[in-house]
Amino acid sequence: MAGIKAPVSEQFHSAGQRREGAYLGMWLFLSTEFMMFGGLLCIIWYYRLAHEMQVSKAVEHLHYGLGGFNSALLLTSSFIMSLAIQAARKAKMAHLRSLLLVSVGLACAFLALKGYEYHSEYQEGLLPVLTSQAPLKEPAARLFMGLYLISTALHAMHILVAILLGAGIWLRLRLGRLPMPERLTVIETFAFYWHAVDVIWIFLFPSLYLIGRPV
Amino acid sequence: MSVSRLFGVYLGALVLLGVAIALSLTGFAHRGPVIMACALGEAGLVLTYFVELKDNTSLVRLFALGAAFWILLLFAGPMIDQVTR
């Protein structure tokens, strides 16, 4: 924030300029992430329009309840991460560490639930390559399950990276190697990534689980 | 940003999620666009308040807008092909 006094490297005039540089760099990175998942979403939507009925048969088998609960978990973790940023700005270190840990815990719960979902889909014979996909008669429905697996697994990998980064930051905070608010930019840019992973899921969830679900 | 405002944004996003799930279980004819509008609303709330785009400099907001513009271009090409066949 503008009022925070912190030493800056010689290439920056002020802490505000350094912060803006960090924000811009992070947004540039996040743009590439959004473009990657945007491409996947584009394929999913094009495929949905081209094979509406067949995709609907695949969507019927997906566990929208688990996906919806996972969406709520990610939204909650984003909210908690925002509270962690507020704590970091006020240098409430114990509070910050606790909130960070809760966020990481919620992301772990997301992954655990996703793992359970994959397991049940494996048992139902829905997953491509690993199973025969016998419940899905149409080739287009089988291919949609391939798109589902690629996009959700790629997203789960991003969640895993976020968990590892979060655990690393928590450890550095615990060891006193990230003084706040002087190193606020570190946790702010990390939170950007956290929220971006949430935003990606916000679009993946309805695109895969909800639209075209037979009533 | 105040904790109460952040909590309000969180509740708003949860309500939009609930509406999207509930709509998907109905026979409403135009549920697809409405469900995606709910998702856009959720993403808007997260980016505006949790990512704090609202309080950022114009240059940072321009970068974010740039990302949205490139995604729009990405979607526009294939969709033009689809809707003009």
Image: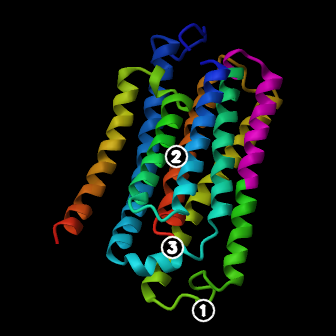
Q: Hey, which quadrant is residue B12 in on the image?
A: top right
Same subunit: marks 3 and 1 = yes
Q: Position of residue A36 (x, y in %)?
A: 42, 56
Locate residue B59 relative to residue A73 in the image: left or right: left
Q: Is there any visible trace of residue B64 in the rendered image?
A: yes
Residues rendered magenta in the picture:
A88-109
Spatial separation of the CA atoms under disc 3 and disc 1: 23 Å
Quarter occupied by the C terminus of chain B: bottom left
* Residue on which the image places disc 2: A199
Give yes or no for residue A108 being in the magenta stretch. Answer: yes
Q: Position of residue A169 (x, y in %)?
A: 72, 36
Same subunit: marks 1 and 2 = yes
| Chief secondary structure of the magenta portion | helix
Locate residue A66 relative to residue A173 in the image: left or right: left
Query: Which residue type does callout 1 highlight?
Result: Ser
Q: Position of residue B38 (x, y in %)?
A: 47, 47
Query: Which residue type does callout 3 highlight?
Result: Pro
Q: In the rendered structure, which disc, 1 or 2, sits on the residue that comes first in sequence?
A: 1
* Residue on which the image places disc 1: A132
Q: Residue at x 38, y 75 (%)?
A: A52
Query: Which residue type does callout 2 highlight?
Result: Val
* Residue on which the image places disc 3: A214
Q: Residue at x 67, y 22 (%)?
A: B3
